[in-house]
Image: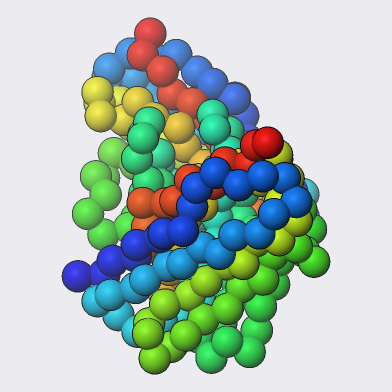
Amino acid sequence: QVQLVESGGGLVKPGESLRLSCAASGFSISDHYIHWIRQAPGRGLEWISYISGRGDNTNYADSVRGRFTISRDNAKNSLFLHLESVRAEDTAIYYCAREGDTDAYFFFDSWGRGTLVVVSS
Amino acid sequence: DIKMTQSPSSLSASVGDRVTLTCRASQDISRYLNWYQQKPGEVPKLLIYAASRLQSGVPSRFSGTGSETFFTLTISSLQPEDFATYYCQQSYNVRTFGPGTKVEIK
């Protein structure tokens, strides 16, 4: 059974750092692109980053580029999102999601339940 | 980046109604368009991928059409469990979501 479990969220002060983790089971993360997507309270979904199966291809939304870093540990079947210089607007539930594909059409077919990050002094 | 817009932002409908939601892309994305349903407190669920392909296990009352810049999601007969927020998402390049359409009970 495919499962993604995020952890590492919590209350953090503006300007501080935090590392989120996403533990995968039921599949190998080396076979998939994995994405981080966030949702601010009462707001919509915002894609923020992805990493390829081999970890050699990453990308970020403009809103987090230069502050967030995505990485993965295929041996532990886990990936990570390091948040630096956090801002109030980074307050959100952070989801990791697996990207599947059929006939080269890509979609998020499995999501974790998310971990809440609250940025407040 | 490709900007996605959705309309309406919210709508009220009754059980049994036929409902159509629209999604527009700021540039041609071919058929690289997905639809997700999210209920309060729950994780988004994939409904439609490649603009019109129904994800396994999704009821056939959901259907998607469109290509290039204009897409629709239709629920042929709204059921109580369909009251939720629906997001479109493009997978043509760096992923982006639309702002969502909230379907509420009339």
- A56, A115: nearer the viewer: A115
Residue B78 sits in which quadrant? top left
Residue at (26% x, 45% y) in the render: B60
Q: Which residue is most to the top?
A: B106
Horizontal arrangement in the rendering, residue A15 relative to residue B34 (left or right): right
The quadrant of the image that shows the N terminus of chain B is bottom right
Residue at (37% x, 85% y) in the render: A76
User: What is the total number of numbered labels drawn onto the structure image?
Assistant: 0
Task: Residue A62: give x, y in percent of width and height.
Answer: 79, 58
Task: Residue A78: give x, y in percent of width and height.
Answer: 42, 77
Q: Is residue A38 above or below residue B49?
A: above
Q: Is residue B39 above or below residue A54?
A: above
Residue B9 sits in which quadrant? top right
- B18, A79: nearer the viewer: A79
Task: Residue B85: give x, y in percent of width and height.
Answer: 45, 32
Residue at (29% x, 39% y) in the render: B61
Examine the rendering and report whether any part of residue B52 can be seen: no
Horizontal arrangement in the rendering, residue A110 relative to residue A21 (left or right): left
Residue at (27% x, 19% y) in the render: B16
Q: Is residue A29 above or below residue B87?
A: below
The quadrant of the image that shows the C terminus of chain B is top left
Examine the rendering and report whether any part of residue A5 can be seen: yes
- B93, A13: nearer the viewer: A13
Indicate how the structure is coloured in the image.
Answer: rainbow
Task: Residue B51: give x, y in percent of width and height.
Answer: 50, 55
